[in-house]
């Protein structure tokens, strides 16, 4: 019998489990696959404050950014506080970026066109300027998730955090209305509370409890280059279009250049967003467009080879905000999913706030904007 | 199309697609392409190498050395006259268009083919810069050469013809695709396998081409399978001192296998005689379990093994070169990109599922040779031909073989001329004892000489000896197919039976030369499992302790298989260490492609609004 069952061993589930264990709760983490086998393992590892509009998600991002920095001290995974540079193609875009940065209220530096190359020597000519966000960072998300689980298990007393991999949740156990555990393909697991941290599959888990949660997949491709001998790109560099695409409601393909180096020497190139369900078929036109945008931003990449590509399914909700908190419709069920492309960055804050809820404390941030029952019922939505 | 001709179309939006695009210029691909071309189809064949032949036949033409080679050269010449042959083209993806056509995405740096057979597309006037061939280098070579050589390994790889050209994209539109991409070497890791001087068996054949490089070398050959024999006898014949052939399994109990029935006794006897002539010891239940040396191989530890390959005793042999081979990994990523169903071969390798007509589970896509089960060049050629017939029949049925052309031959005589000549010449001749020894491949591998070399190219790397191959049940060979024109018409019983026999033979070889789990005990904590990313065994074990329960999550947590070779070299070993069968490859980019070439594919009207 655990105090908390966390469904999902991705980075969000790992953070929930870690902070819950740290709060003194007994935790069992269940995943149908391995650690970090879902969306956590198919993203870029973004820890961004720069791409958030002012509001609840930005507050979450700022809190999370601080938490990542302290988690990084645990060691065991790469955390690069490299900073992000948003570049503008035109004067008009630069004006908009400047205005956004002013409203965000996070640390930033306006970069005039002539100074762009002191940040990124290989940037293309002709850009209108940019904004530098020193808090933006990158984390190796798979190792980070695994490390959080490991620390959760090792640091807060024997048996505090248990991991059950390869077990698929097939239903919920109930006592009256209240959730008292989950049924899995490897038997029942009892717990006082169940946290749905199933990411893109969070809607399916919620449905097992009879709760409507509109989490849907948005496919994103990433291109990976050969390892470069010399780092070509110092920061996370992206175009202003990324900010608008993140919040876009378009079902069609959207791409914007997001380019950065990694400690392994490779360059990661994103980002695309499409609503095509769980289709893994590689789209050559998408890869071509990502390459085109990256080369436009960094002409020196033209002769660099892409050696692989992967795609993932970002869990998005209709209002592009995550779902964090207790589900008033199902006592004992909590949600921590639907972070879209920001799950890595927002994981620590999500776990921290949820652990506060589970431990009966007042969360540091108002969770009202993230409440699970904010969506119209399925019938109404249809 | 003769040398110098424009390919039919090199744009994705061209007016008329090829009836068939064949990927891979080895025995299967050439036979399939020729068969279809003789039937009147518009055919293009793409290969990454500088000349046709694949791993088995790709070498400077030395006519007369092997019956199989003579026949292959005839086929290649005949093909050149009837199809577009695009050499030095790396196929990095295959995709399906909304209208049902297939797009074969290639990258090349070569404007004109400096080969005796064929031409590549006309030069790109904007081309500048750099050369080709780097893809033919394996990850280990990358590492050894400090990352710099992807720009200059070219000379070793492709010759000077394409020097100074920027890589560009070539897209072929096709109604049908034949995947004839062969297989690559399957090494196993062991302490010291990353030392210069350690090669795969296939890589060792590259040494042969060097002539003077080989002579005087002291070479140890180790691994499992009959492929070790031609490698060793070839090296010995070229003047190397082969200190021993160490076969980890029970060895030449071939009399127990259907080999004799197939008339291959002469072939084996030839190798055995060659080894005896050069006083090369052949030891069974022994293998090299470690290589030693400061900067390159100076000695190896040879171990006696029990049936599970656990070490029971060891001794040290001084040498300067080690060639190892533990079988082959079929290259099937183009098939998996298109969603083709796979199955596990007898040895666990994922291979494409095909019916009796070599059709995969995806419409319009056929596969022949090693991608449907490792079985050697003879079987590959037969399957290529059968696939060619089935494809021709499919084109007849569909009636979309190109309005401007008529069939050269009609009806069931679709395969004529050279294809049928081949039926009676080389295949019946089984004493190709010299063929394998002369299959050295100059391209690219020479540049990667100090390391184990795999063949991550699109070109076949078939075993010299028919070496295994399970079947899709007997059904595949027995004629339970789905060919549009009817299996009976497409696959004559005599071919079906022959294929069935050879598949069974290949399967028997896979059973006779398995990889046993004891090799994992040869590793130390610091033994590199993945050389591209320099991942030692300890990191793999850490990843497992952290919750990686399969090969993919081991890769995500510890990075084996994330580097240049995309797991082609280490994938099998990582799967074994993770305790699962090798899974079908997920390689959306089958071969490295420059961002510039990739970017050129972006449609102008696709541009985002910003």
Image (spheres, rainbow, N blue to C red):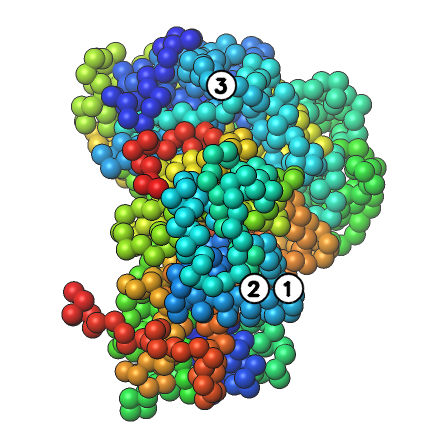
Mark 3, other Cα within 10 Å: few <14 / some 14–19 / many ≥20: some
Residue furthest toward the bottom? A176
Chain bearing mark 2: A
Q: Are marks 3 and 2 on the same chain?
A: no
Name the residue that disc number 2 marks. A144
Closer to us: A45 or B226: A45
Closer to us: B406 or B338: B338
**Residue B149 sits in which quadrant?**
top right
Q: CA distance from mark 3 to mark 2?
A: 44 Å
Chain bearing mark 3: B
A316, above or below B383, in the image = below
Name the residue that disc number 1 marks. A76
Name the residue that disc number 3 marks. B127
Circles 1 and 3 in contact, beta carbons < 8 Å? no
State which mark lies toward you, 1 or 3. 3
Tag 3's secondary structure?
loop
Tag 1's secondary structure?
loop
Q: Residue at x 50, y 70 (%)?
A: A63
Q: Residue at x 53, y 61 (%)?
A: A107
Mark 1, other Cα within 10 Å: few <14 / some 14–19 / many ≥20: some
Relative horizontal placement of residue A269, taking residue A83 as reference (left or right): left
Tag 2's secondary structure?
helix
Circles 1 and 2 in contact, beta carbons < 8 Å? yes
Q: Position of residue B250 (x, y in %)?
A: 64, 44
A76, above or below B404, in the image = below
Relative horizontal placement of residue B17, taking residue B460 as reference (left or right): left
């Amino acid at each position: 019998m655990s105090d908390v069952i966390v469904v999902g061993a991705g980075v969000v589930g790992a953070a929930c489990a870690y902070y819950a264990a740290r709060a003194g709760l007994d935790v069992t983490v269940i995943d149908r696959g391995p650690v970090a086998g879902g969306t956590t393992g198919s993203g870029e590892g973004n820890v961004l404050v720069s791409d958030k509009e002012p509001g609840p998600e930005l507050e979450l991002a700022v809190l999370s950014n601080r938490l990542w920095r302290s988690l990084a001290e645990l060691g065991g995974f790469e955390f690069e506080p490299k900073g992000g540079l948003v570049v503008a193609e035109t004067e008009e875009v630069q004006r908009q970026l400047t205005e956004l940065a002013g409203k965000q209220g996070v640390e930033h530096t306006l970069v005039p066109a002539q100074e762009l190359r002191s940040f990124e020597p290989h940037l293309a000519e002709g850009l209108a300027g940019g904004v530098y966000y020193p808090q933006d960072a990158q984390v190796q998300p798979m190792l980070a998730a695994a490390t959080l689980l490991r620390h959760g298990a090792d640091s807060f007393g024997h048996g505090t955090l248990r991991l059950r991999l390869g077990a698929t949740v097939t239903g919920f156990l109930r006592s009256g209305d209240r959730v008292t555990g989950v049924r899995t393909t490897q038997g029942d697991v009892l717990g006082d509370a169940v946290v749905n941290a199933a990411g893109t599959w969070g809607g399916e888990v919620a449905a097992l409890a009879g709760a409507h949660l509109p989490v849907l997949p948005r496919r994103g491709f990433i291109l990976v280059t050969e390892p470069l001998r010399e780092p070509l790109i110092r920061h996370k560099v992206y175009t202003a279009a990324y900010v608008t695409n993140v919040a876009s409601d378009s079902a069609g393909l959207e791409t914007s250049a997001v380019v950065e180096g990694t400690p392994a020497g490779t360059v990661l190139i994103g980002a695309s967003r499409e609503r095509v369900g769980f289709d893994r078929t590689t789209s050559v036109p998408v890869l071509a467009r990502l390459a085109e945008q990256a080369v436009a931003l960094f002409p020196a990449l033209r002769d660099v080879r892409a050696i692989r590509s992967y795609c993932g399914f970002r869990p998005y909700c209709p209002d592009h905000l995550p779902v964090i908190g207790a589900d008033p419709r199902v006592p004992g069920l909590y949600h921590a999913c639907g972070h879209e492309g920001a799950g890595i960055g927002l994981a620590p804050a999500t776990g921290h706030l949820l652990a506060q809820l589970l431990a009966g404390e007042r969360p540091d941030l108002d969770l009202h904007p993230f409440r699970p029952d904010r969506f119209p019922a399925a019938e109404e939505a249809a | 199309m003769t040398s110098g001709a424009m390919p039919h179309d090199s744009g994705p939006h061209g007016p008329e697609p090829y009836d068939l695009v064949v990927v891979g210029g080895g025995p299967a691909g050439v036979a399939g392409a020729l068969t279809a071309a003789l039937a009147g189809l518009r055919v293009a064949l793409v290969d990454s190498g500088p000349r046709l032949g694949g791993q088995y036949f790709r070498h400077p033409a030395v006519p007369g050395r092997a019956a199989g080679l003579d026949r292959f050269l005839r086929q290649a010449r005949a093909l050149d006259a009837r199809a577009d042959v695009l050499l030095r083209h790396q196929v990095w993806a295959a995709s399906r268009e909304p209208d049902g056509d297939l797009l074969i995405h290639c990258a090349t740096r070569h404007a004109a083919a400096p080969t005796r057979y064929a031409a590549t597309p006309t030069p790109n006037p904007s081309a500048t810069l750099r050369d080709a061939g780097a893809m033919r280098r394996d990850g280990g070579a990358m590492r050894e050469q400090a990352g710099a050589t992807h720009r200059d390994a070219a000379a070793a790889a492709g010759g000077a013809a394409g020097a100074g050209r920027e890589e560009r994209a070539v897209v072929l539109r096709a109604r049908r695709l034949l995947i004839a991409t062969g297989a690559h070497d399957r090494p196993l890791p062991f302490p010291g396998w990353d030392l210069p001087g350690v090669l795969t068996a296939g890589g060792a054949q590259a040494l042969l081409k060097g002539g003077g490089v080989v002579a005087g070398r002291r070479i140890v050959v180790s691994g499992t399978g009959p492929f070790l024999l031609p490698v060793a006898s070839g090296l010995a014949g070229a003047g190397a001192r082969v200190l021993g052939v160490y076969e980890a399994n029970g060895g030449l109990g071939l009399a127990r296998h259907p080999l004799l029935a197939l008339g291959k006794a002469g072939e084996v006897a030839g190798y055995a005689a060659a080894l005896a002539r050069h006083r090369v010891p052949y030891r069974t239940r022994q293998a090299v379990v470690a290589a030693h040396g400061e900067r390159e191989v100076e000695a190896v530890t040879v171990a006696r093994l029990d049936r599970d390959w656990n070490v029971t005793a060891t001794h040290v042999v001084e040498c300067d070169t080690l060639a190892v081979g533990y079988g082959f990994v079929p290259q099937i990523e183009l098939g998996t990109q298109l969603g083709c169903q796979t199955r596990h071969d007898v040895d666990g390798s994922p291979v494409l599922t095909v019916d009796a007509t070599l059709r995969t589970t995806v419409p319009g896509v056929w596969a022949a040779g090693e991608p449907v089960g490792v079985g050697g060049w003879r079987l590959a050629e037969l399957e290529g031909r059968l696939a060619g017939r089935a494809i021709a029949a499919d084109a007849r049925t569909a009636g979309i073989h190109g309005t401007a052309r008529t069939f050269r031959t009609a009806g069931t005589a679709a395969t004529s001329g050279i294809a049928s000549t081949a039926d009676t010449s080389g295949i019946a001749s089984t004493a190709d004892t010299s063929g394998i020894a002369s299959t050295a491949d100059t391209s690219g591998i020479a540049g990667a000489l100090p390391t184990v070399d795999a063949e991550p190219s699109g070109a076949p790397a078939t075993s010299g000896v028919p070496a295994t191959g399970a079947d899709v049940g007997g059904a595949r060979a027995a004629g339970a197919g789905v060919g549009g024109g009817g299996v009976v018409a497409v696959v004559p019983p005599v071919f079906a039976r022959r294929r069935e026999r050879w598949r069974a033979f290949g399967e028997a070889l896979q059973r006779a030369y398995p990889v046993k789990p004891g090799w994992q005990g040869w590793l130390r904590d610091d033994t590199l499992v993945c050389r591209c990313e320099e991942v030692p065994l300890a990191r793999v074990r850490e990843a497992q302790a952290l919750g990686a329960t399969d090969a993919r999550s081991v890769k995500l947590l510890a990075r084996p298989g994330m580097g240049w070779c995309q797991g082609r070299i280490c994938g099998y070993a990582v799967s074994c260490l993770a305790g699962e069968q090798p899974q079908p490859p997920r390689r959306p980019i089958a071969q490295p492609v420059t961002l510039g070439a990739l970017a050129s594919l972006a449609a102008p009207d696709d541009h985002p609004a910003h």
